[in-house]
Image (cartoon, helix red, strand yellow):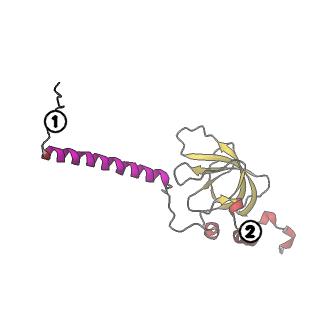
Amino acid sequence: QTKTSPQRAHLDPKSTKQLSSFIKNKIMQSLTRFFFIATLLASPVISCKCVNPPTVENSLNDEDNTDVFRVRVKHEIRPNDVGDNYRYYAARVKRVFKGTMRAGSERVIIKSATHSCGEIFEDETVYLLFVSKQEEQAKKGLDTFTVKACDSNKMYSEVTEDEKEILDVHRKGHVHLNEKDKNSFPTN
């Protein structure tokens, strides 16, 4: 019996080189895409960058921040406005470091942008917030305060002893008339 050898396709050297080059290019494109996507997924996305790193002191002295509070964020409030680009949080002021509000049982609304520079707050967590009072009485008839990017907003448990001292010195130096003993003022 005679064995027949399988026929081999004959490729000339030029088309073999072209095919090899084509395959290498496709593999390189796929690897490049893979590593690009892997790099994006593995590294944090930083789209919001402050010119100067925020500190408690410069945030406290920023005139745009009308108030500085230690607040307990109760929960997020879902706005009725579907197109609203803000998150709203019900909060209770625990201490006032700057501003005219009285601490204790004051309920407020904290407003934060939803874009990448906005803040997201956890329910039932205490924060140090540098805020601007809004003219609007936006939600539920409560005063509304807005946080902005590049301030030293943080969980109160992350506030250092030095930062607490800065806040207390500022608070004592700016005690408001409604908190002082009215008898201590000279009268004419």
Q: Amino acid at mark 2?
A: Arg
Toward the viewer: 1 or 113? 1
Query: For residue 55, which quarter of the picture?
Result: bottom right
Toward the viewer: 6 or 42? 6
Q: Which residue is mark 2?
A: 171
Classify residue 12 as left or right of residue 125.
Answer: left
Q: Which residue is mark 1?
A: 9
**Residue contact between numbered discs 1 and 2, judged by CB atoms under 8 Å:** no
Give the total number of marks visible in the rendering: 2
Above or below — where is 8 with respect to 101? above
Locate residue 145, reporting x and y percent.
Answer: 64, 53
Q: Is residue 107 magenta?
A: no
Tell me the crowding category of disc 2: few under 14, some 14 to 19, or many 20 or more residues within 10 angstroms, Cα based: some
Label 1 vs 2, first from the N-terminus: 1
Query: For numbered disc 1, what is the local secondary structure?
Result: loop
Residue 129 visible in the snapshot: no
Classify residue 179 as left or right of residue 4.
Answer: right
Q: Amino acid at mark 1?
A: Ala
Per the rendered image, the range of residues in magenta is: 15-42
Locate residue 5, reporting x and y percent.
Answer: 17, 31
Name the magenta segment's main secondary structure. Answer: helix
Locate residue 84, reporting x and y percent.
Answer: 54, 43
In the image, what residue occupies the spot 85% across and 72% down? 184
